[in-house]
Image (tube, grey):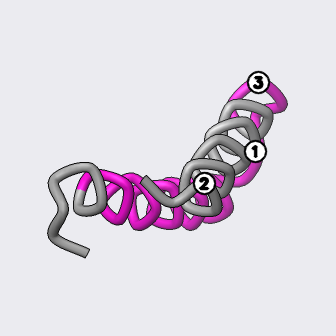
Amino acid sequence: MDIKIFYLSLRNRAKLEKLLIEGANKKKILRQEKLLEKYLLEQLKCMNKIC
């Protein structure tokens, strides 16, 4: 698995958690969720050797 994708996934998960704790705007939270989902899907593809 590419370490860059793993790092981006981890960083965006932390950002999302921070937004949820702070009670940020729903638009920001939704945007962050979509970004995290993108990296998680990419990570799964690489784990399954599809990338």
Dot label at residue 15: 1
Quarter of image, res 34: bottom left
Q: Please rate how many residues cluster around mark 3, counting C-alpha atoms within 10 Å: few if below 14, some from 14 to 19, many from 20.
A: few
Q: What range of the chain is rendered magenta?
A: 20-44
Q: Nearer the viewer, residue 38 or 20?
A: 38
Q: Residue at x 68, y 31 (%)?
A: 17
Q: In the image, what residue occupies the spot 52% across and 66% down?
A: 35
- Residue 23 image offset from top left, x and y in percent: 76, 34
The image quarter in which residue 37 lies: bottom left
The residue that label 3 is drawn on is 21
- Residue 21 in the magenta stretch? The answer is yes
Please, which residue is most extreme toward the bottom here? 51
State the residue position of label 2: 3
Estimate how packed mark 1 is, as few (under 14), some (14 to 19) or many (20 or more) residues with alpha carbons within 10 Å: some
Instruction: Please state, as top left, top right, bottom left or bottom right, where the C terminus lies in the image.
Output: bottom left
Q: Is residue 12 above or below residue 51?
A: above
Circle 2 SS class: helix
Q: Nearer the viewer, residue 3 or 11?
A: 3
| Residue 7 percent location from the top left of the image | 67, 50
Mark 2 or mark 3: name the one nearer the start of the chain. Answer: 2
Q: Amino acid at mark 1?
A: Lys
Alpha carbons under labels 3 and 1: distance apart: 10 Å
Q: Amino acid at mark 2?
A: Ile
Give the residue at x 72% y 53%.
25
Identify the secondary structure beneath mark 3: helix
At horizontal 50% and vertical 55% (from top left) the residue drawn is 36
Q: Is 14 placed above or below 9 here?
A: above
Q: Where 6 sits versus 5, above or below? A: above
Query: Is residue 18 found inside the magenta-colored segment of the image?
Result: no
Residue furthest out toward the top: 21
